[in-house]
Amino acid sequence: MRLEHLLVKKHLVIISTFVIVAFAFCLFIKANAGWPVPMGEQTDGYELIFEDHFNGDKLDTARWSIPPRGNSTWSRWISTDKEVIEINKGKLTCRAIPNKDRSQDSATMLTGAIWTKDKFTFKYGRVEVRMRTNLQSGNFPAAWMGRQWGKGNVPPYGEIDIVEMVGNDRKARHAFHTEYTTKTPKHGIKNSFMEQVEVNKWHIYAIEWTPEYIHWSVDGKITGRHHKPKTGNVQNEWTFDVPFYLLLNQSIMHGVYGIKADLDKTYETQFDWIKVYQKRYE
């Protein structure tokens, strides 16, 4: 009887040890593999204030519009062509396509972009976007945010890049730009971060933006941090205390940083959904 009792006790110890080790391993994997964490479980007090799952067959013009063409890399070939913006089966697809008819438009390529400027803006919060892109040389899609400029007002520059992808590089790139970083080439501030990611597969890219810091994450794993300077804001080093709008786009980097795109190919990025959460700050 004593021998049987000892054997049973030994087996229970082995089983208990196995359960503890297995549980610890699961916690380790969850912490390091970037499992998505529901917003309500991650930070108390946040409420959903904006979301678009891109259902239906057309863009919700009460929330989004197409930005005007500009001189920057992302905006130089923006088009209203129906092929560069498509909503189908709950997905938004933004494309860059060859311009086959230059009789009316001399642009080399036609690219798709949408933003919420003048329609939806917010100050502080958490943004999550689920997206994937193709892997091609010259590819340059992004989910990002711009500082809302009022009429007749030209405030200091501010930009928060939730995520950008470049070419066939399997990396998620996050960044911020201020009046100081854009006008001071040797600013010495770490304003960009990278994380190895299979960008051609679905991932959730997010930022948490507060009065004191901005954190970036991929599938719940923190990938970058920037804190408000403690020395004040004399040189416009922190230009993130005003409302921002959302922007989703597909562009190409042809000739930028020596990167060449294939101007005969189509580039595309898919967005499954985008959500904005917010809580009050006193």
Image (tube, rainbow, N blue to C red):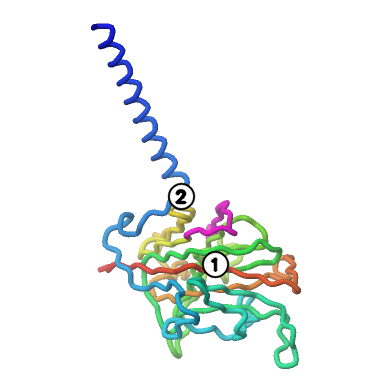
Q: Amino acid at mark 2?
A: Gly
Q: Give the answer, above or below, for where 126 lies relative to 151.
A: above
Mark identifier at residue 181: 1
Choose the circle earlier in sequence order: 1 or 2.
Answer: 2
Residue 282 located left or right of residue 136: left
Q: Amino acid at mark 1?
A: Thr
Asked which quadrant contains residue 9, the reply is top left
Stretch in magenta: 189-204
Q: Residue at the far top: name it.
A: 2
Q: Residue at the far bottom: name it.
A: 104
* Residue under the point 45% across and 82% down: 60
* Residue under the point 47% across and 59% down: 204
Q: Give the answer, above or below, for where 176 lies relative to 69.
A: above
Residue 31 located left or right of residue 197: left
Asked which quadrant contains residue 192, the reply is bottom right
Residue 222 position within the rendered picture, expressed as x and y whole percent measured from the top left: 45, 52
Q: Closer to the observer: label 1 or label 2? A: 2
Mark 1, residues whose alpha carbon is within 10 Å: few (<14), some, or many (≥20)?
A: many
User: Of helix, strand and loop, which one carries label 1?
Assistant: helix
Residue 142 position within the rendered picture, expressed as x and y whole percent measured from the top left: 56, 68
Q: Marks 1 and 2, how far apart in space?
A: 30 Å
Q: Give the answer, above or below, for where 255 lies relative to 191.
A: below
* Residue under the point 40% across and 68% down: 275
Mark 2, residues whose alpha carbon is within 10 Å: few (<14), some, or many (≥20)?
A: some
Residue 191 located left or right of residue 79: left
Mark identifier at residue 34: 2
Residue 256 position within the rendered picture, expressed as x and y whole percent measured from the top left: 70, 69
- Residue toward you, 118 or 154: 118
